[in-house]
Amino acid sequence: MALLLYHLNRLPPPFDYLTESVFEIPAARGMRLANRHVRLIFVLGGDARLRLGEAEPVPLRAGDVVLLPCPAAYGYLPAVPGMPARLQALAISVKPSMLARQIAARFPRPVHLPGIQNAHMLHHLYQIRTEAENGQRDAPLVVGARATLLVLALLRGPVEKLSPARINRPSAYLVEQAREFIFKNHSGELTLAGIAWHLRLSEEYARCG
């Protein structure tokens, strides 16, 4: 089951749609999914395991990116077998285009990039959510531009596995959102409950995080 946080489907070419969801991954069977076009998945929170084809499932954590350059089956499994899990992710679907061909040329097979998100990407991810929530008429254009910059950051940046310590860090995406929220609302009354509500987290989770 997936809780849809927002879905944008009127984006400028070559994008098909952009969506952010929270997946509730069943303990028994996990989740099976498929993509029709090139898809980029930015993991924003939670812990799970990623299944790509027949390969052995790999850990999936906040900060990871998954690229699916062609129609392919994939799925999410609980991080701990036999226990349900939750995963929050933003997915960008790219229609057949020059950009899609560039992605496929750089990543000819489905690939999992652990801990690859940097401050530049996190900024665009945060701004995409802000635009989606504001709902202004020009939001699809702005989101399309941000999505393009995200893709270019992956195509131009070095692709390397980071140390386990950095991979296991708390979600930098949530930290970026919290910092931005505090900066914009510092003149008012700031409470942990208010920050947690803005981040769509429970107060207990925000306190522990």
Image (spheres, rainbow, N blue to C red):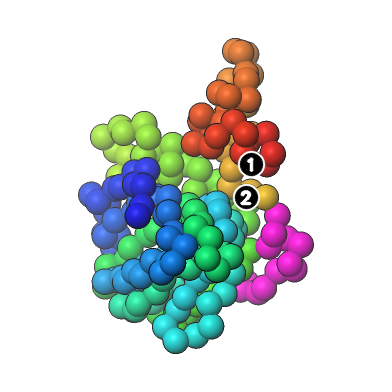
Can residue 153 be seen by looking at this rendering? no
Q: Residue type at mark 1? A: Val
Query: Which quadrant holds residue 70?
Result: bottom left
Question: Nearest the camera: 105 or 117?
Answer: 117
Residue holding disc 1: 175
Q: Specify whether residue 24 is painted magenta.
A: no
Instruction: Give coordinates of residue 164: x percent, y percent.
Output: 73, 67
Q: Residue at x 39, y 58 (%)?
A: 91
Question: For residue 30, what is the image quadrant?
Answer: bottom left
Q: Position of residue 188 (x, y in %)?
A: 60, 13
Q: Residues within 10 Å of mark 1 (few under 14, many from 20)?
A: some
From mark 1 to mark 2, how far is it between C-alphas?
7 Å
Q: Main secondary structure of the magenta part?
A: loop
Q: Which residue is mark 2?
A: 171
The residue at the point 45 percent across, 71 percent down is 67
> Is residue 175 among the parts visible in the rendering?
yes
Q: Residue at image x 53%, y 60%?
A: 83
Q: In this orientation, which residue lies closer to the viewer: 142 or 209?
A: 209
Figure check: 135 above or below 150: above
Residue 179 lies, in percent from the top left, at 64, 34
User: Quadrant of the image for the N terminus?
Assistant: bottom left
The answer to the question of whether label 1 and label 2 lie on touching residues, with beta carbons closer than 8 A, is yes
Q: What are the residue bounds of the magenta stretch?
A: 158-169
Secondary-structure class at tag 2: loop
